[in-house]
């Protein structure tokens, strides 16, 4: 049996002393598992690096936007600020609110030179739901590829366990073929098989940490967007439009 060739070769041979020797001494099936884990590791680190850059830029843009929004007193000022600032979830939420108000005919009172048109309670509630939906949409946009980290973190240990089980099976097959019953004959093959589990944990642990970190940041961004929606409605109230 081809899969038993590597464990059989280890029987009576030198015990692998380094991780690389364990990898080179692994069977073809175990090597395939290690290759899959290597690909998953590269993918997870690539996602984490890209998301770290994306969230760093978003944090800088949101701080700048909020600093300038603090001086805004009317919705027109918020709209102008959104046009001046680089695109971000906050600028898009502002533009969406302005579009809604431009397309909505106020029904709570007629406009005059000194008094702006007043939105009804139903229109204010519709605006609130629109802002909440936009905040959720922006969160979903930022969440791209983040669930993949959770999948890698949960699936990698199972893949590693599969490689270990297959390696142990091959080791015992090699032991049966050799006909030796001492532990020294099977120990090298089992040690090599356990490399797959160790490799899987080195893939899963960073991916799980990354997923939790970015999930918390996504929740924080969503809360900030919801709070910003309330600030926009408060801005309309100060203008007398609510």
Image (cartoon, rainbow, N blue to C red):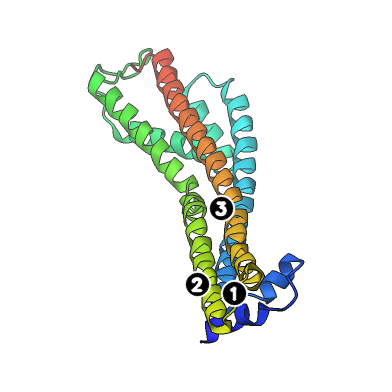
Tell me if residue 188 comes above or below residue 84 in the rendering.
below
At a point 28% along the width and 24% down the height, the residue shown is 125
At a point 38% along the width and 12% down the height, the residue shown is 114
Residue closest to the far bottom: 1
The answer to which of marks 3 and 2 sits earlier in the sequence is: 2
- The Cα atoms of the two marked residues, 3 and 1, are separated by 18 Å
Q: Is residue 225 left or right of residue 192?
A: left
Residue 37, located in which quarter of the rendered image?
bottom right
Is residue 79 at all visible to an observer of this figure? no
At a point 58% along the width and 73% down the height, the residue shown is 181
Circle 2 sits on which residue? 169
Which mark's residue is nearer the viewer, 3 or 2?
2
Residue 204's disc number = 3
Circle 1 sits on which residue? 31
Q: Nearer the viewer, residue 206 or 162?
A: 162
Q: Nearer the viewer, residue 20 or 138?
A: 20
Measured as percent of width and height from the top left, residue 94 is found at 46, 34
Which mark's residue is nearer the viewer, 2 or 1?
2
- The Cα atoms of the two marked residues, 2 and 1, are separated by 15 Å
């Amino acid at each position: 049996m081809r899969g038993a060739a590597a464990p059989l070769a280890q029987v009576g041979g030198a015990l692998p002393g380094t991780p690389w020797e364990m990898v080179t001494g692994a069977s073809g099936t175990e090597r395939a598992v290690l290759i899959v884990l290597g690909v998953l590791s590269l993918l997870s680190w690539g996602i984490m690096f890209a998301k770290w850059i994306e969230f760093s830029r978003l944090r800088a843009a949101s701080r700048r936007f909020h600093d300038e929004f603090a001086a805004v007193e009317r919705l027109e000022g918020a709209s102008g600020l959104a046009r001046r600032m680089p695109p971000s979830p906050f600028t898009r939420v502002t533009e969406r609110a302005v579009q809604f108000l431009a397309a909505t005919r106020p029904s709570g009172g007629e406009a005059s030179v000194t008094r702006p048109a007043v939105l009804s309670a139903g229109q204010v509630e519709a605006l609130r739901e629109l802002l909440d939906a936009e905040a959720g949409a922006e969160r979903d946009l930022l969440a791209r590829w983040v669930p993949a980290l959770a999948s890698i973190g949960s699936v990698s240990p199972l893949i590693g366990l599969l490689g270990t089980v297959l390696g142990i099976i091959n080791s015992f097959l090699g032991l049966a073929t050799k006909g030796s019953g001492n532990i020294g004959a099977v120990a090298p093959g089992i040690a090599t098989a356990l490399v797959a589990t160790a490799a899987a944990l080195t893939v899963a642990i960073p991916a799980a940490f990354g997923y939790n970190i970015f999930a918390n940041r996504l929740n924080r961004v969503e809360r900030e967007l919801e709070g910003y929606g309330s600030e926009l409605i408060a801005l309309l109230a100060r203008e007398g439009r609510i």
